[in-house]
Image (cartoon, grey):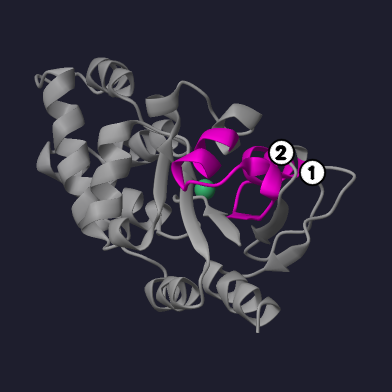
Amino acid sequence: MLALFDLDNTLIDRQGGLDAWAGAFARSRGLPDQAAALVTARLRDRAYPEDFDYLRDVLRLADGAEDLWREYIDGLTRSVCCFPGVLEGLQGLRREGWTLGIATNGAVDIQRAKLDVTGLTGLFDGVTISEGVGARKPERALFDAAAAACGVPLSAGGWLVGDNPATDIVGAQAAGLRTAWVAGGREWADGPREPDLIVSSAAEAIAMLRRLTR
Ligand SMILES: [Mg+2]
């Protein structure tokens, strides 16, 4: 059975890593706390090199935007880690014969770097990143590409585990997948069809998927 996973704030704590990096970055430039808040607000959902054109202008930084992007990749990859139980759970799914894929929106270099540094890369049969395939969740083309990267057709079905209602859950439902929503205490209010599973963490979703196949 195929299980696709969102990356940021599903398998890894991107938000915690971003907050830590933005604070350290602001201090390194002698900027006030409001600057760290501005950085996290700009990069909250997604970060691309052009975001650093904007940030260097509003923060009046002397650095080049490309240098800032590299600094961000290096810093964020040092700051992020998997949520508890994720690595062990994924290893269990693999042992039990599941086919595992990453389906993430973002820039290829930063997403690849985060997968490598957190030890996730080797656990997946396929890694699909929106920038690399020219399609983004919730588009069906992204889910199609993610299944194909794992060597299986999307039409064979499977699961998507993710935290974003619109891009992950509604998108995966439309693509014919079953869904596990990492809700973090939120109520479902994002569409007529509820996720198949509503869980507090990816580790909980993985445990439920493993039970389904025993
Ligand atoms: Mg996410």
- The residue shown at (47%, 35%) is 105
Which residue is the extreme one toward the right?
192
Decide whether the magenta segment is chiefly helix, strand or loop: helix
Residue type at numbered disc 2: Ala
Helix, strand or loop status at disc 1: loop
Instruction: Please state the horizontal and vertical placement of residue 26, each as a whole percent of the image.
Output: 21, 41
Indicate left or right for 128 with 55 as reference. Answer: right
Instruction: Please state the horizontal and vertical placement of residue 156, each as a whole percent of the image.
Output: 68, 49
Kindly tell me whether residue 9 is visible in this rendering: no
Kindly tell me whether residue 181 is visible in this rendering: yes
Q: CA distance from mark 1 to mark 2?
A: 16 Å
Which of the two residues, 105 or 4, is positioned nearer the viewer here? 4
**Residue hosting label 1:** 190
- The residue shown at (28%, 39%) is 110
Q: Earlier in the sequence, mark 1 or mark 2?
A: 2
Q: Nearer the viewer, mark 1 or mark 2?
A: 2
**Residue hosting label 2:** 175
| Magenta segment boundaries in residue numbering | 144-173
User: Does mark 2's beta carbon lie closer than 8 Å to ligand 1?
Assistant: no
Q: Is residue 159 magenta?
A: yes
